[in-house]
Image (tube, grey):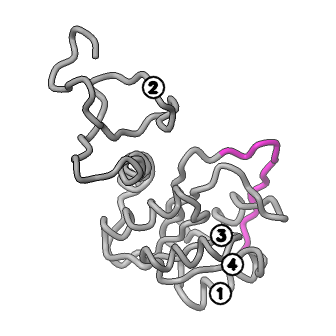
Amino acid sequence: TGSHVENIELGERLAFYTTNGAFCEYTKVDADWAWVRVPDQVTDEEGSLCEMFHGAHIQSVFPSMEKDNEKVLIIGVGPMGLVTLPCVKAMANVTVGAIDLIEFRLNKAKQVGADFVFNHSIHSYDQIAQQIVKTMGKIDLVHICTDLDESKEQNLFDFAVRIVRPFGRLSGLNVEAKGITHKVQIHP
């Protein structure tokens, strides 16, 4: 702690979102950042997830302003998608679908509240789009929770734009298209 830092004691456990290596053993942060104290009854392992929940909420969920009765799609249910999902459910009474390439992650998504799951390792984005229309209807909001498009088609962003309803919303967490050129294709 620096000489001007108040209300934080050396050795306290804090959770916060930062792009400066929050999973490092040590990282430098400003004392006035939004943070929470990690209670003593919360283990270090559980406490480390607080950073992800905080990041999901601050960077993606809160700004997208979910509303009751909306249809929300989460693309990518790895660690960040799996913490985004309950944050979305906590903000509003919404229907949530989840897409991933890994069945284990989709099963976890169901456990934390996904209403529908779609396996992209089995079905193409076109097939998933048809399934979404049949099961969920028009999508109001898409959260992209992946930093790399690992699909064969390499068109994750195009799919997100195509699946969201007109004047719907896209949100994401550190989405990068490393070495991939996306070409948005709107289909009627």
- Alpha-carbon span between mark 3 and mark 4: 6 Å
- Alpha-carbon span between mark 4 and mark 1: 11 Å
* Quarter containing the N terminus: top left
Circle 3 residue: 100
Give the camera-side residue of 29 and 71: 29
Which of the 4 image quarters holds residue 13?
top left
- Alpha-carbon span between mark 3 and mark 1: 14 Å
Earlier in the chain: of badge 4 and badge 1, it is 4
Place of residue 42 in the rendered image (x, y in percent of width and height, measured from the top left): 28, 52
Q: Please determine whether, in this image, residue 176 is positioned above or below residue 141.
A: above
What is the crowding at mark 3: few (fewer than 14 residues within 10 Å), some, or many (at least 20)? many
Which amino acid is tagged 1?
A: Gln
Residue visible at 41% across and 51% down in the picture: 45
Q: Secondary structure at mark 3?
A: strand
Which amino acid is tagged 2?
A: Thr
Place of residue 134 in the rendered image (x, y in percent of width and height, measured from the top left): 60, 91
Which amino acid is tagged 4?
A: Asn
Which of discs 1 and 2 lies nearer the camera? The answer is 2
- Alpha-carbon span between mark 3 and mark 2: 31 Å
Circle 2 residue: 27
Q: Mark 3 touching mark 2, by CB under 8 A?
A: no
Earlier in the chain: of badge 3 and badge 4, it is 3
Left or right: 49, with 139 as reference point: left
Look at the image and say whether residue 16 sits in the magenta stretch.
Answer: no
Q: Secondary structure at mark 4?
A: strand
Which of discs 3 and 2 lies nearer the camera? The answer is 2
Q: Mark 4 touching mark 1, by CB under 8 A?
A: no
Which amino acid is tagged 3?
A: Asp
Earlier in the chain: of badge 4 and badge 2, it is 2
Q: Mark 3 touching mark 4, by CB under 8 A?
A: yes
- Alpha-carbon span between mark 4 and mark 2: 37 Å
Instruction: Farthest residue to the left: give it.
Output: 7
